Image (spheres, helix red, strand yellow):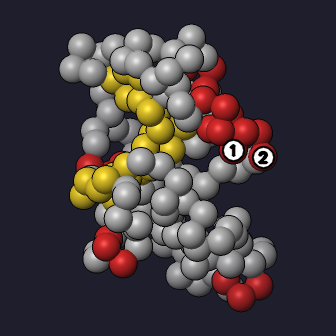
């Protein structure tokens, strides 16, 4: 099946998987585009992408740590630096100097996940508490054990 504007029959099943986010039009209807917000967490995610990449438009979007670059966080998953930067035909990014990151065939748009607002699914609840927590006294070198 070729890439079309019609919603793929497997679209709703795909967007249940973590890295895949839906795209909606101005009427709230799904469109045949999926945003990939993080590295694939499992081989299954990568297999799904490979299976449907010619039938659904997959675009990368900056959301998770340094993605599409490997995270500097030593506790995050690691992958080769070049794995995701050229995988999708387009990328919604947040990096400075994207020409140093993405190959020339990738179409780019300076727009990351944090630039979007999500519609509220329910009325806002009255605020009962307003506080923050600062973990500045935690021993990160010991994996924050005991906090």
Q: Is residue 143 above or below residue 17?
A: below
Question: Which residue is located at x 52 percent, y 25 percent?
Answer: 55
Q: Are marks 2 and 1 in contact (CB under 8 Å)?
A: yes
Question: Which residue is located at x 28 percent, y 38 percent?
Answer: 117
Question: Which residue is located at x 78 percent, y 46 percent?
Answer: 43
As drawn, which residue projects farthest toward the bottom?
141
Tell whether 57 sits left or right of 76: left
Which residue matches tag 2?
43
- Mark identifier at residue 46: 1
Q: Residues within 10 Å of mark 2 (few under 14, many from 20)?
A: few
As drawn, which residue projects farthest toward the left?
26
45 and 119: which one is in front?
45
Question: Which residue is located at x 74 percent, y 78 percent?
Answer: 143
Which part of the image, by quadrant, shows the N terminus?
top right
Tell whether 98 sits left or right of 83: left
Where is residue 63 shown, x and y percent of the image? 44, 55
Report how far apart the C-alphas of labels 2 and 1 lie in the structure.
Answer: 5 Å
Tell whether 62 sits left or right of 146: left
């Amino acid at each position: 099946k070729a890439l079309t504007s019609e919603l793929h029959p497997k679209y709703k099943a795909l967007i249940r998987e973590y890295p895949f986010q839906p795209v909606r039009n101005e009427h709230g209807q799904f469109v045949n585009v999926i945003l990939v917000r993080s590295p694939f967490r499992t081989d299954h995610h990568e297999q799904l992408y490979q299976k449907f990449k010619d039938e659904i438009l997959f675009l990368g979007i900056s959301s998770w740590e340094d993605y599409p670059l490997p995270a500097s966080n030593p506790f995050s998953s690691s992958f080769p630096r070049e794995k995701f930067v050229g995988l999708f035909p387009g990328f919604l990014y947040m990096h400075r100097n994207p020409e140093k990151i993405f190959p020339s065939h990738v179409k780019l748009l300076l727009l990351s996940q944090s630039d979007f607002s999500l519609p509220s699914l329910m009325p806002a609840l009255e605020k009962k508490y307003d506080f923050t927590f600062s973990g500045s006294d935690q021993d990160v070198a010991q994996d924050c054990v005991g906090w």
